[in-house]
Image (tube, rainbow, N blue to C red):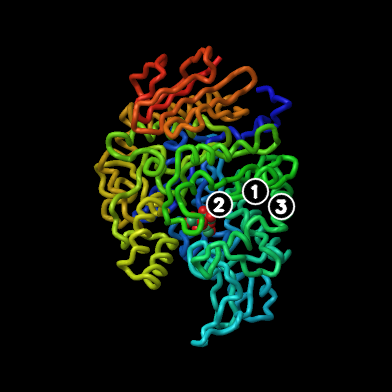
Amino acid sequence: MTISSEHPETEPKWWKETTIYQIYPASFKDSNNDGWGDMKGITSKLEYIKGLGVDTIWVCPFYDSPQDDMGYDVSNYEKVWPRYGTNEDCFELIDKTHKLGMKFITDLVINHCSTEHAWFKESRSSKTNPKRDWFFWRAPKGYDEHGKPIPPNNWKSFFGGSAWTFDETTNEFYLRLFASRQADLNWENEECRKAIYESAVGFWLDHGVDGFRIDTAGLYSKRPGLPDSPIFDESSELQHPNWGSHNGPRIHEFHQELHKFMKDRVKDGREIMTVGEVAHGSDNALYTSAARYEISELFSFGHVDVGTSPFFRYNKVPFSLKQWKEAIASNFLFINGTDSWATTYIENHDQPRSISRFGDDSPKYRNVSGKLLALLECSLTGTLYIYQGQELGQVNFKDWPIEKYEDVDVKTNYGIIKREFGENSKEMKKFLEGIALISRDHARTPMPWSREETNAGFTGPDAKPWYFLNESFQQGINVEEESKDGASVLNFWKRALQARRENKELMVYGYDFQFIDLESNKLFSFTKEYESKTLFAALNFSGEQTEFRAPKEDSSLSFVLGNYDDVDASSRVLKPWEGRLYYAN
Ligand code: TEU
């Protein structure tokens, strides 16, 4: 590959070209029939993952934890949670991943730790403890008429309610932007930062990991003084925490320091990649500029947040295809002609199933709209991420009662709405509609390996899986049946990933992205370039037959890949949910 001087972003790197498969350890594969997925379970399925055409795995937090937030509440960074196995099991997993020619990325949850972590226990013990300043302790603002302490500011937790928890040991509040027992670490304290690097990063670098997915990577530098947030949401006393915690004044400095720590720690020359969960950065190009030595790439949320209210995720709002197209493009447009880099993803453990949101999950169109989403993902510039089950065309579970939801975010908000408005209120009705589409639980049901076996082969027939299975495994959405079916979503993903590898210059590194028919609310159509080559995508995101036009009147199109078997590549009419990729000249 030659690098165009006008497009430094095309400088080849392993972590740009790789496809990353995200594993949620609780729900991937159980090896010892205790109902929880585990390290050995993942190890046993590495050949399956490699067979997809994937070359990196990212495993969500598997560290010791009380599991208030499914392991995003770490109580010991250097120990595997016993239900997931031993440290040795994890080292074996890393080793086998490498032997199969793949890379291993681990999750780095360092904005906060569990209140069960030894650091927090010490910090909480007294106001004069040497680790007191490792967390954000503040006196109450005052006391209400019932003598209840009032939180120090008006920040709301990402999971609902105040972002502060009162601790009676010293009668002060600690800041926790997520669940009550996920205490925010104070990055202003240098000793604390060094301890985080050593324990959460150094330990795993020493054990051979190839990179980190950095959780909530925009939140480490809080607004100095932790002032009240201005009122953005008039309907609430508590305000979204982003104003006080996101992209703070020292955030880039902290990432540079972390990057330097990693670079100094690795002695064998391997190139570590990092992907930061930045959500809504205004300076994405700064975070990911190669010359600035911060992070390799980042996840933005614009395209997965469409259709949800910025004040409350479970309030659905209308959105158009045009809006979604623009949000997707903003994930990579900022790197054009720079030395930054991008990601492409549509599912993860915090998102519902993409077919249910952006395709059509009815039996008639599930298969073809799942393949359409695969075509889209595989043709976009940036490192590609696939979330477990996405390759099967998994869909949201249907009509589950509230009791079957498990996520702390759902449970906390359910409790708040029930208390404030009541079980039969219109607010509750709206919330229940919201979670049926948007809940993180849709992504967290156990992986369906087969139809016939009880528990879909995720765990032994006599075991009780930690979470309910999505009934869809009995409707053909499982690895065993899809592997045998040439027309399955699974086999299409394999073909699409192969096409991405074979055409990586255009598909992975392609630049100068242009929409065709941006105004169309049915067509997602675009071109991108690499030297003299042009990739043209015509994707019909509607259930109606739709005509497309070529990028130029006289373009000659040569067909690369499409999601209908009986394709007439010369026709300009797309069937419902049909997509095609062409080279255009
Ligand atoms: O997510 C951060 C984040 O932005 C989400 O919490 C988002 O607001 C939420 O999913 C909406 O419900 C990361 C992890 O990916 C998530 O699983 C953790 O719960 C969270 O951090 C706390 O560590």
Identity of the residue drawn at 36% across and 42% down: 394
Mark 1 and mark 2 lie on one chain; the one further toward the N terminus is 2
Q: Is residue 338 visible?
A: yes
Mark 2 and mark 3 lie on one chain; the one further toward the N terminus is 2
Quadrant assignment for the N terminus: top right
C-alpha span from label 2 to label 3: 20 Å
Nearest to the observer: residue 103 or residue 522 = 522
Measuring from the top left, give residue 556's x and y in whole percent.
Answer: 51, 12
Nearest to the observer: residue 82 or residue 14 = 14
Contact, mark 3 vs mark 1 (Cβ under 8 Å)? no
Nearest to the observer: residue 279 or residue 264 = 279
Q: Would you say 154 lies left or right of 9 here? A: left
Q: Which residue is the site of mark 3?
A: 252
Camera-near label (2 vs 3) is 3
Q: Which residue is the site of mark 2?
A: 107
Nearest to the observer: residue 36 or residue 547 = 547
Instruction: Give, as a three-letter code, the residue at label 3.
Output: His
Q: Which mark is residue 282?
A: 1
Q: Is residue 56 visible?
A: no
Measuring from the top left, give residue 510's x and y in whole percent.
Answer: 60, 27
Work out whether 561 lies above or below 276: above
Instruction: Give, as a three-letter code, the residue at label 2.
Output: Asp
